[in-house]
Amino acid sequence: MTTEIPLTELDAARWEGLETAHWSSPATMVPRVLQRLAAAGPDGGRPEDCELLHCLVPEPGRPVPSATPVALPFLLALAADPATGAARGPLTALLARLLPAAPDLPERHRSRALPLLTDPDPAVRRAALPLAPDPDCLLGLWRTEADPSVRLSLLLALAGTATTGARAVLAETLTEDHPALYVAAVHASAGHDPDLPVRHLDRLLTLLTDPALRPRFDHVWYPAHRPDPLTRDHLLWSVYGLLAHRPDLQAAYPGHLLAAADRTGDAALRREAVLLARHHGGG
């Protein structure tokens, strides 16, 4: 661990008598998990260790567990330390749950977390987005972000703010060349304009059924609370869901996919089209 908080301070912290948010997770477990993450190095951090530390997040309407303020400086240090390696993203996701859920924690902790929004690692930047203090911060990040996966997560975060600036970004992204960003803009816009996916259906079908574009949907769309990113095949189903208010178009949608699969010889597209047709028919 190369942070300014040495492991001796972790050992010296008093954990006996402290509480977490889960009765099955004693506070004395927390320093052991932090020790493992600190000692694991760039390639050794285990996601399940990060999951164990979610016991520090307060339950809705409940006070912050007494172990959380003690653990928080170590969590921040580990998340910021490049030597923590692959565990930095899950640790940042933990902080992004913890800090908004605990508004009474000292402001200095939020300030220390803000640099994660501009970290060199895209996985950390994606995970840190809930830490943005306001929509203007998200807009500023949008203007400078180049990584497609972070831009997509930023787009969805902006859409949730429903500000004038966010609407402008959505409108701009509906002209986006990157297929996954465009599809994300359609999904994000549907919340305030349910007919927008209908108006864009032809282009959606073109992009989602082009075998040459399929790789551009991979490793870009990382939804919250999912371990893996969405793929083109996931998005075939989500577009079907966007058409629920238009039963005629929803019923015809699997047939359009099947016809495209026949033209292109796309076996994966054919499989999803058949599954969608069965689903729609109640089979």
Image (cartoon, rainbow, N blue to C red):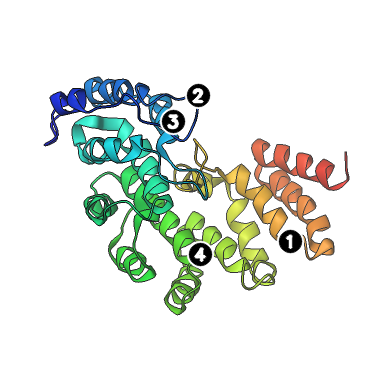
Mark nearest the camera among 3 and 2 is 2
Which of the two residues, 34 or 258, is positioned nearer the viewer here?
34
Q: Name which residue lies at 26% across and 21% down.
A: 40
Which of the two residues, 241 or 138, is positioned nearer the viewer here?
138
Question: Closer to the N terminus: mark 2 or mark 1?
Answer: 2
In three-dimensional space, the C-alpha distance between marks 4 and 2, rounded to whole angstroms, equals 34 Å
> Seen in the image, is 269 located left or right of residue 49?
right
Residue 124 place in picture, x, y as percent: 32, 44
Q: Name which residue lies at 45% across and 65% down.
A: 158
Q: Which residue is mark 3?
A: 51
Q: Which residue is mark 1?
A: 243
Which of the two residues, 81 or 244, is positioned nearer the viewer here?
81
Q: Which residue is mark 2?
A: 24
Residue 160 marker: 4
In three-dimensional space, the C-alpha distance between marks 3 and 2, rounded to whole angstroms, equals 14 Å
Residue 89 marker: none
Mark nearest the camera among 2 and 1 is 2
